[in-house]
Image: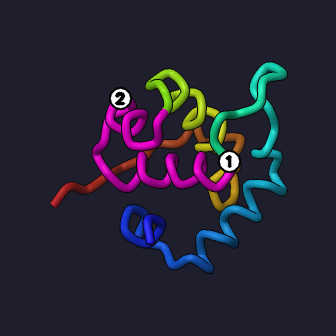
């Protein structure tokens, strides 16, 4: 129920995302200390962070952890939620980009 409410993902989509994060190494420990939240709860926290405007303090209260733990979880799992890393072309810095604003 919380998954669909806060992330707008179906439970099956969230389960696939959880499997992907687990395969990418997201279930590791933090400096030899186990996480106080399960991987699913940490992934839900990151998804809620990206989908809402809640602060780390508010997320900490919602999940029962400190705001520094929320920050560590976001830094650790946030990059793992990306679908595919995109490589920049080697000459991207030398290109001239023109953006038209409407």
Marker disc for residue 38: 1
Can residue 96 be seen at all in this image of the molecule? yes
Task: Choose top left, top right, bottom left or bottom right for residue 21.
Answer: bottom right
The residue lying at 25 percent from left, 56 percent from top is 100
For the magenta stretch, what is the residue range? Answer: 38-64
* In magenta segment, residue 54: yes
Task: Choose top left, top right, bottom left or bottom right for residue 53.
Answer: top left
Q: Return the disc, 1 or 2, that comes first in the chain's sequence.
A: 1
Q: Residues within 10 Å of mark 2 (few under 14, many from 20)?
A: some
Real-space Cα separation, disc 1 to disc 2, in angstroms? 19 Å
Q: Secondary structure at mark 1?
A: loop
SS assignment for the magenta stretch, majority: helix
The C terminus, quarter of image? bottom left
Where in the figure is residue 81, as x and y percent of width and height?
63, 54
Q: Are marks 1 and 2 in contact (CB under 8 Å)?
A: no
Where in the figure is residue 63, as x and y percent of width and height?
46, 42
Where in the figure is residue 4, as x and y percent of width and height?
43, 72
* In magenta segment, residue 51: yes
Q: Nearer the viewer, residue 90 or 29?
A: 29
The residue lying at 76 percent from left, 64 percent from top is 19
**Mark 2 — residue?**
57
Can residue 86 be seen at all in this image of the molecule? no
Q: Residues within 10 Å of mark 1 (few under 14, many from 20)?
A: few
């Amino acid at each position: 129920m919380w998954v669909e409410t806060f992330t707008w993902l179906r439970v099956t989509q969230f389960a696939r995302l959880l499997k992907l994060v687990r395969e990418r190494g997201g279930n590791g420990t933090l400096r030899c200390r186990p996480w106080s939240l399960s991987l699913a709860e940490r992934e839900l926290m990151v998804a809620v962070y990206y989908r809402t405007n809640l602060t780390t303090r508010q997320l900490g209260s919602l999940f029962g952890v400190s705001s520094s733990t929320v920050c560590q979880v976001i830094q650790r799992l946030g990059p793992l939620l990306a679908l595919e890393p995109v490589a920049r072309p080697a000459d991207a810095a030398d290109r001239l980009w023109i953006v038209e604003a409407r």
